[in-house]
């Protein structure tokens, strides 16, 4: 039985909504097999208030969430990542740091709820939709037989999950 814990980094530009939600969801549903982290290329410096409120309302522990740079995960003391997922189109097109250990990477673009327009209710619904999308993708991801897939097959699976809506 495989007892390895896989480290997963979610990247976005601001690290205030999507990547934080990805980290939260994976840490909840990963059952100790997965450890989620998040960062941004140009962090906002704070987690979006609607992100925090949504996660608190879903009984996530939000006490450790903060907006941080991806540089925090590229140094020698950083945890080695097994997977790196970009969850916004801007971060997917940026030149990322070189990650130690050559993690698998995929782009799982999700619309930015922080950019949602309309009434407050419509904006909050955008955050809830982001949570739903990431829960769905991560549920598929954690069910993959990671230890029995070769690297190419696994990359195809990760890319396909990113296409799910």
Image (cartoon, helix red, strand yellow):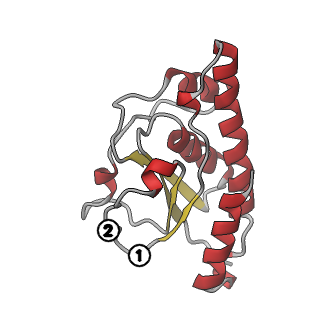
Q: How would you rate the neighbour count of disc 1 (Cα within 10 Å): few for under 14, some for 14-19, many for 20 or more? A: few
Q: Quadrant of the N terminus?
A: bottom right
Question: Which circle marks residue 98 in the picture?
Answer: 2
Residue 122 percent coordinates (x, y): 69, 20
Please state which of residues 88 and 52 is positioned toward the viewer in this rendering.
88
Query: SS at mark 1?
Result: loop
For image coordinates 34% across by 71% down, the residue present is 100
Residue farthest toward the top in the current orientation of the protein: 119
Using residue 146 as the reference point, say whether residue 97 is left or right of it. left
Residue 65 percent coordinates (x, y): 45, 35
Q: For marks 2 and 1, give the CA distance.
A: 8 Å
Residue 152 percent coordinates (x, y): 60, 84
For image coordinates 67% across by 38% down, the residue present is 131
Query: SS at mark 2?
Result: loop
Could one spot residue 106 in this view of the protein?
Answer: yes
Q: Is residue 159 above or below residue 73?
A: below
Name the image quarter holding residue 95: bottom left
For image coordinates 59% across by 21% down, the residue present is 53
Please state which of residues 124 and 81 is positioned toward the viewer in this rendering.
124
For image coordinates 70% across by 67% down, the residue present is 160
Could one spot residue 59 in this view of the protein?
Answer: no
Total marks placed: 2
Using residue 34 as the reference point, say whether residue 68 is left or right of it. left
Question: Which circle marks residue 23 in the picture?
Answer: none
Please state which of residues 27 and 139 is positioned toward the viewer in this rendering.
139
Residue identified by numbered label 1: 102
Name the image quarter holding residue 25: top right
Residue farthest toward the left in the current orientation of the protein: 76
Q: How would you rate the neighbour count of disc 2 (Cα within 10 Å): few for under 14, some for 14-19, many for 20 or more? A: few
Cβ–Cβ below 8 Å for labels 2 and 1? no
Residue 151 percent coordinates (x, y): 58, 83
């Amino acid at each position: 039985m495989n007892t390895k814990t896989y480290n997963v980094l979610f990247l976005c530009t601001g690290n205030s909504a999507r990547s934080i939600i990805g980290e939260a969801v994976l840490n909840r549903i990963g059952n100790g097999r997965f450890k989620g982290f998040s960062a941004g290329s140009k962090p906002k410096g704070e987690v979006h208030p609607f992100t925090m409120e949504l996660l608190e309302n879903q009984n996530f522990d939000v006490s450790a969430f903060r907006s941080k740079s991806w540089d925090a995960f590229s140094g020698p003391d950083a945890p080695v990542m097994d997977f790196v997922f970009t969850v916004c189109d801007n971060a997917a097109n940026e030149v990322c740091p070189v990650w130690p250990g050559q993690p698998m990477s995929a782009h799982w673009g999700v619309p930015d709820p922080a950019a949602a327009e309309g009434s407050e209710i419509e904006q909050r619904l955008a955050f809830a939709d982001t949570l739903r999308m990431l829960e769905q993708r991560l549920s598929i991801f954690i069910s993959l037989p990671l230890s029995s897939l070769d690297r190419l097959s696994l990359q195809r699976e990760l890319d396909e999950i990113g296409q799910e809506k």
